[in-house]
Amino acid sequence: MAKGVKSSVELILGPQENLYAMSAYVDQDIPFEKEIKDFLSENTNEKIVILTDLLGGSVNNEILQLVANMENVILVTGMNLIMVMSVLLTTDDTIDEQIDDIIDGSKNGILRCSQVDIESDADLDDF
């Protein structure tokens, strides 16, 4: 999922030098735990936002344990494309203040389309 979302984001926004995708438990050549630990230890002076798919999933649980006391890391679950793009379009110095708005915005993109009045909804773009 992570690599697919990264590919989709870069299709829309172009290449992103600060976007990393780790396919946990898929590529066993490099154990996921080691890969994420190495990444975190190499970026201790950087603000890091980690997005995972499922609350309570194995990836989220593993990362939650690793970053519990790391002030430079924000861990968010329920990742979707809107969320990833919003994080990327936010500057590092404002991400702490904006993360809750980003989460709300990504939730607002989840709709049952049969209940959306397309003719009168000004928030929908023409495609």
Image: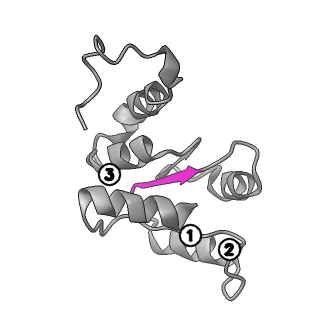
Q: Hey, what amino acid is under mark 2?
A: Phe
Q: Is the stretch drawn in magenta largely helix, strand or loop?
A: strand
Which part of the image, by quadrant, shows the C terminus? top left
Q: Which residues are the magenta region?
A: 46-52
Name which residue lies at 47% across and 58% down: 5
SS at circle 2: helix
Classed neighbour count for the residue bearing mark 3: other residues with Cα under 10 Å, few (<14), some (14–19), many (≥20)? some
Image-quadrant location for residue 58: bottom right
Indicate the position of residue 62 as horizontal and vertical percent values: 73, 58
Residue 22: mark? 1
Q: Which residue is mark 3?
A: 88
Q: CA distance from mark 2 to mark 1?
A: 8 Å
Residue 32: mark? 2
SS at circle 3: helix
Q: Hey, what amino acid is under mark 1?
A: Met
**Would you place residue 14 above or below residue 78 in this image?**
below
Indicate the position of residue 44 as horizontal and vertical percent values: 46, 65
Image-quadrant location for residue 10: bottom left
What is the total number of numbered labels drawn onto the structure image?
Answer: 3
Indicate the position of residue 124 as horizontal and vertical percent values: 29, 26
Q: Hey, what amino acid is under mark 3?
A: Leu
Name which residue lies at 26% across and 47% down: 91
Inspect the magenta stretch and tell me whether residue 47 lies in it: yes
Inspect the magenta stretch and tell me whether residue 110 lies in it: no
